[in-house]
Image: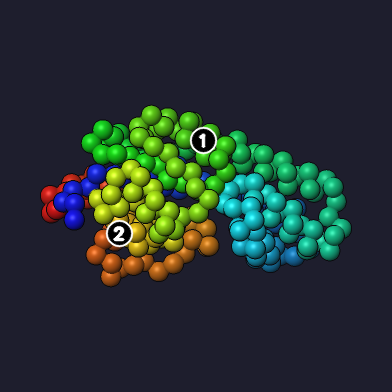
Amino acid sequence: MPGKLTTIGFDADDTLWQNEQFFRLTEKHFAALLADHGEEAHISARLLEAEKRNLAIYGFGIKGFTLSMIETAIEVTEGRVPGSTIAEILAAGRDMLGHPVEALPHARDTVEKLAGAYHLVLITKGDLFDQERKLAASGLGDLFDAVEIVSDKSAATYTRIFGRHGDPRASMMIGNSLKSDVVPAIEAGSWGVYVPHELTWVFEHVEPPVEAPRFRQLVDLGELPALIESIDKSG
């Protein structure tokens, strides 16, 4: 087994920069548009049902979210949703695709510290154009050795990506989603580091794999360099 880490993978949304807050704000606006057809909690629940149904068709990201909002609007109004409401939903989706990129605390400093010493890979899912836009706007793009925009994150995904960029056993994945970033990376033989975000989509919630030897949880990204150093020394 390799003694030291060689490859470090980072999730993007809500790990390096804010993302979920824009979905939450848009969802509240969407519920307000349909207030005559149900309480906010009811509209949100119907939207979540549509999102889950559509993941296999549209994938993750803003475009799929927008289509799910339109589908939900049609359903809860029994097909009577006005064209003006559809137009507002589409406008909300476009606004999300242009939202500013707000880096999370310690994101830049941490990535800069690790760049050059490790093979850094950004591993993210979602809309291709949107993720590329956010990476460019973040100013972090040049610090990564590779960028992998995937349709989903599974153990097979990490085995393939870390195998291509090194060795899964000598790799680490950092992210805010236990379901997408941490658990499948550990299943692939890598380290999985959980950095919680105050807002995480309910679909991404699973129990922390606290018994897994390669699971770690940090308060924020500022703690990551020390963790990596300790793992390297112990190896």
Regarding mark 2 in the picture, which secondary structure is present there? loop
| Numbered label attached to residue 189 | 2
Rendering coords of residue 30 (x, y %): 70, 53
Q: Please, is residue 99 above or below residue 46 in the view?
A: above
Q: Is residue 23 left or right of residue 72?
A: left
Residue 176 appears in the picture as rendered: no
Q: Amino acid type of disc 1?
A: Glu
**Which is more N-terminal, label 2 or label 1?**
1
Quarter of image, res 54: bottom right
| Residue 107 position in % (x across, y down) | 36, 40
The quadrant in which the N terminus is found is: bottom left
- Position of 235 relative to 129 (above/below): below
User: Residue 8 appears in which quarter of the rendering?
Assistant: top left
Residue 214's disc is none
Q: In the image, what residue occupies the spot 75% across and 44% down?
A: 88
User: What residue sits right under mark 1 in the picture?
Assistant: 132
The amino acid on which the numbered mark 2 sits, given as a three-letter code, is: Gly
Q: Quick one: SS at disc 1?
A: helix
How many numbered marks appear?
2
Q: Residue at x 52, y 39 (%)?
A: 131
